[in-house]
Image: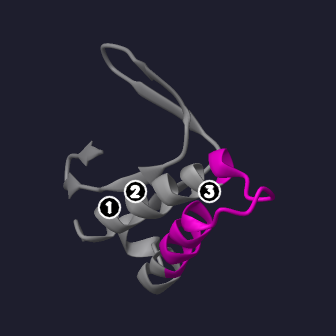
Amino acid sequence: MKFHDGTEYIAVSDGFVEVRKDKVSIIVQTAETAREIDVERAKLAKARAESHLENDDDNTDIHRAERALERANNRLRVAELK
């Protein structure tokens, strides 16, 4: 997001954005600024999700693991923009 005094990068989950002439509204479950992201935690979450995806166990929820991997990758990309 751009502000008068600079730019702030934010990792967001799925949601909605409404852009108007003078205002932007963002409705999401989670939003973290680059400074708020715990990089080590995101790396662990990424490794855990990748492990679940590599597992051939029928109990693995593939959709959930894919979403977790997307969230972790998003956090890591945004954290690099500090």
Q: How many marks?
A: 3
Q: For numbered disc 3, what is the local secondary structure?
A: helix
Range drawn in magenta: 44-64
Mark 3 belongs to which amino acid? Answer: Ala
Mark 1 belongs to which amino acid? Answer: Val
The residue where tag 1 is placed is 78
Residue that appears at 57% across and 49% down? 67
Image-quadrant location for residue 81: bottom left
Report if the CB atoms under discs 3 and 2 are less than 8 Å apart: no
Who is closer to the viewer here, 4 or 63?
63
Residue 29 within the segment the image draws in magenta: no
The residue where tag 2 is placed is 74
Q: Residue furthest top?
A: 21
The residue where tag 3 is placed is 65
Quarter of the image for the C terminus: give it.
bottom left
Residue that appears at 33% across and 19% down? 22
Q: For numbered disc 1, what is the local secondary structure?
A: helix
Identify the main secondary structure in magenta.
Answer: helix
Residue that appears at 30% across and 62% down? 77
Mark 2 belongs to which amino acid? Answer: Asn
Report if the CB atoms under discs 2 and 1 are less than 8 Å apart: yes
Quarter of the image for the N terminus: give it.
top left
Q: Position of residue 33 (x, y in %)?
A: 41, 62
Q: Residue furthest right?
A: 59
Q: Residue furthest bottom?
A: 40
Q: Is residue 80 left or right of residue 51?
A: left
How busy is the neighbourhood of tag 1: few (under 14 within 10 Å), some, or many (20 plus)? Answer: many
